[in-house]
Amino acid sequence: MIDLEIRASQFSNFLKSPQDLIDSIENPLEERIELVTGTLVHKAVLKGEKAYKDYINENLVTLEVSTRNNKTYIHKKKELADAGIDKFIILQKELDNIEKMCENVNNNDLIASLLIEPNHFVEKTFRKEIDGVKFKGTVDYISDDRLFDLKTIAKTKPTYRIKEYNYEIQLGLYCMLSGIDLSKAKCGFIFLHKDEPYNCETFIYDDDSMNVIIGEVKRLISLWKRFAENKLNVNFNSIERNITTRDTYFESTTKRINELECLYDKIKIT
């Protein structure tokens, strides 16, 4: 297990259980509309219209139907499978909505200013071994003094989303993988809303907050290393964490790391 290369976006699955992390590495998520929406928006905003259209042509099939629960959609899906064509079927109305969203995002002043900043990179991939564990991560946007991860969200508050999906684990790993200077850089998230009026919201951390986050990520890496080296890929029950507004953004994650440490100690004793 220690030889597995872990993507930054996967590592927070360890907060559910060691087995959940292994499963996410060995059995990646199947494409679904939420993932495709995120990918298309990233291509359009960060790489431009050509990259956006190339992705559609190479990976998607567009269908003019109102729902996936009809004969036309089912027939098309079977037709693609029988022909061995691995493409995702996107509804035209979904694509229309994505294009409206992208148009609004491209008119956002912050996005525009970031993309003309000198020495910036988009979708830059880093690989690094941290405390003996191999990690890989693709940073959406990085320059000399900025690091941002773009997230598409629907009908929820960014602060809740951060806690629900442990995005700070991912962000902390991106900072560690890239080696960005936290004393000079602004790091955080740009949330792109998938519903009208397609607002953009930023969530930026100061360097003290980022150092706290990275400290907890280091704890988590050290704990994973202990589980992996002792082959303790036990599939204990994944815990549905009670996320409340009373928790600060990283408080619920810290509680869960403490629980995992107690679990490790208990398993080792038995």
Image (spheres, rainbow, N blue to C red):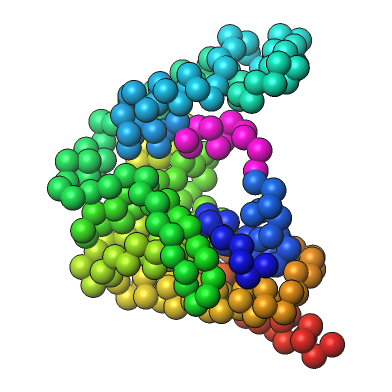
Most frequent secondary structure within the magenta stretch: helix
Report the side of 263 relative to 186 (left or right): right
Q: Residue furthest bottom?
A: 269
Above or below, 264 relative to 159: below
Residue 219 can be seen, yes or no: yes
Q: Where, quadrant-wise, is the N terminus in this rendering?
A: bottom right
Q: Is residue 6 left or right of residue 72?
A: left
The answer to whether 135 appears left or right of 147 in the picture is right
Farthest front residue in view: 3
The stretch of residues the image draws in magenta is 29-39
48 or 208: which is nearer to us? Answer: 48
Q: Is residue 59 above or below residue 248?
A: above
Where's residue 155, x and y in %? 52, 40
Residue 216 magenta: no
Across and down, in percent, residue 231 comes to 74, 74
The residue at the point 50 percent across, 32 percent down is 37
Residue 38 highlighted magenta (yes or no): yes
Residue located 75% across and 69% down the image: 233
Taking the image as drawn, is residue 197 in sight? no
**Position in image of residue 57 (x %, y %):** 48, 19
Q: Position of residue 126 (x, y in %)?
A: 40, 57
Q: Residue at x 45, y 26 (%)?
A: 55
What residue appears at the point 53 percent right and 56 percent down from the top-left corner?
Answer: 7
Quadrant of the image containing the C terminus:
bottom right
Q: Is 63 located above or below residue 241 in the figure?
A: above
Q: How many marks?
A: 0
